[in-house]
């Protein structure tokens, strides 16, 4: 006998249910607006509820990603969101729903990592994995999917206590940046569109310097359009200027009680001025002043884990930067794949492993 029922819903219903459940700190990738961003660049998004009887015990939005040769995979980033600890039958029942209602003839796997919001107790999902499930080992994690770990700080303490927790290097560079004339401002609402070109220019520079992949300009434009339309409720752009030249832009998104630093770029000419430290510190202070509870710096690699998480080897410098602001490391759940077509899945995985090992061997040089 089935424990769970699954019900597909549309975007408006998903937004309504998300609001009615009053989930304060769900992952950004399961917020309604994130699915709308994906749709605005042409991706197909599926949304569904998970029910036990008449009670909602979970919900999720899943995104279809097209790859070469007409194939695709489905990804549920940091989801499904579960309001109760899933039972031993969840994975098999979830798989039946996905295979019958979500995938199509070109789908070769489905990836997800359950986020337990308010659930109590440990789940036992790993004990009896269905035969076509694969739990990703840590060595296969990488920056091409959502992060396993992120650094967050609570904004409850007084500002002077937050400053006290900063590493001395961060304090020095914050002061240096101020002395060198870096000016920080915050932009939201329609005015944000003025900075789209600067944002893309600085992102491109930073990606070339740090060797990470960019989203399309269409995707960034979709986010900026949404922020321009919604206003400050969606987030703000942190802008750094020197002598009236835009030398830094950081995109910060608000979801629930959290402000998340999502994307950012800086002009390498001015990095020695410490502008990145000043921009993050001023953003933290703004988030606290505006009444938010958490500030997230985004993805990191925990200390001692860089040898295990081979796909994150290029993030050591970024992690070191974020660690200097204090706080704690938040860990997300394990990642599981439902293998629909084993040949294509093995081919995709082999190519991805090769890419991760190249990063490990050459260290992006």
Image (cartoon, rainbow, N blue to C red):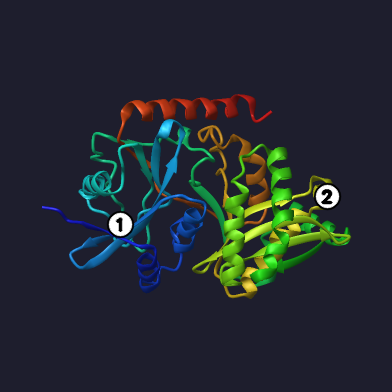
Side of 110 where 174 appears, left or right: right
Pick the residue in front: 169 or 95.
Answer: 95
**Which residue is at a point 73% across and 49% down the rendered structure image?**
201
Q: What residue sits right under mark 1 in the picture?
A: 121
Q: Which quarter of the rendering shows the C terminus?
A: top right
Report helix, strand or loop for mark 1.
Answer: loop
Q: Is residue 218 left or right of residue 71?
A: right
Mark 1–mark 2 CB contact (< 8 Å): no
Whichever of labels 1 and 2 marks the residue nearer the N terminus, that label is: 1
Residue matched to label 2: 270
Residue 129 placement (x, y as % from top left): 26, 39
- Label 2: few (<14), some or many (≥20) within 10 Å? some
Q: Quadrant of residue 154?
A: bottom right
Q: Does residue 4 sit above or below 207 in this rendering?
A: below
Q: Is residue 183 above or below residue 107?
A: below
Q: Position of residue 188 (x, y in %)?
A: 66, 69
What SS does tag 2 mark?
helix
Q: Is residue 317 above or below residue 25?
A: above
Residue drawn 66% across and 70% down?
190
């Amino acid at each position: 006998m089935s424990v769970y029922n699954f019900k597909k819903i549309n975007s408006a219903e998903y937004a309504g249910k998300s609001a009615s459940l009053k989930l304060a700190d769900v992952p950004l990738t399961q917020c309604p607006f994130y699915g709308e961003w994906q749709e605005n660049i042409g991706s197909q998004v599926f949304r569904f509820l998970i029910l036990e009887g008449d009670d909602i015990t979970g919900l999720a939005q899943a995104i279809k990603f097209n790859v070469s040769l007409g194939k695709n995979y489905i990804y549920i980033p940091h989801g499904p969101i579960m309001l109760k600890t899933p039972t031993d039958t969840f994975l098999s029942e979830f798989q039946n729903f996905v295979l019958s209602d979500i995938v199509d003839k070109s789908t070769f796997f489905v990836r997800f990592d359950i986020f337990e919001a308010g659930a109590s107790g440990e789940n036992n999902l790993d004990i009896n994995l269905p035969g076509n499930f694969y739990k990703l080992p840590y060595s296969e994690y990488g920056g091409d999917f959502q992060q396993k770990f992120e650094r967050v700080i609570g904004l409850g303490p007084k500002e002077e206590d937050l400053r006290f927790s900063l590493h001395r290097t961060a304090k020095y560079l914050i002061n240096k940046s101020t002395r060198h004339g870096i000016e920080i401002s915050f932009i939201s609402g329609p005015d944000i569109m003025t900075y789209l070109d600067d944002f893309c220019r600085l992102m491109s520079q930073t990606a070339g310097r740090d060797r990470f992949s960019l989203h399309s300009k269409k995707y960034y434009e979709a986010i900026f359009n949404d922020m321009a339309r919604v206003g400050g409720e969606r987030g703000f752009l942190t802008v750094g200027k020197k002598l009236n030249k835009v030398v830094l832009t950081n995109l910060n998104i608000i979801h629930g009680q959290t402000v998340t630093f999502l994307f950012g770029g800086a002009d390498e000419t001015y990095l020695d001025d410490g502008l990145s430290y000043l921009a993050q510190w001023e953003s933290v202070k703004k988030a606290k002043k505006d009444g938010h509870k958490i500030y997230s710096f985004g993805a990191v690699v925990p200390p001692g884990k860089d040898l295990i998480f081979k796909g994150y080897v290029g993030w050591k410098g970024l992690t070191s930067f974020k660690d200097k602001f204090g706080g704690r490391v938040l860990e997300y759940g394990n990642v599981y794949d439902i293998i629909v077509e084993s040949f294509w899945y093995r081919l995709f995985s082999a190519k991805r492993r090769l890419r991760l090992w190249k990063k490990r061997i050459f260290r992006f040089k």
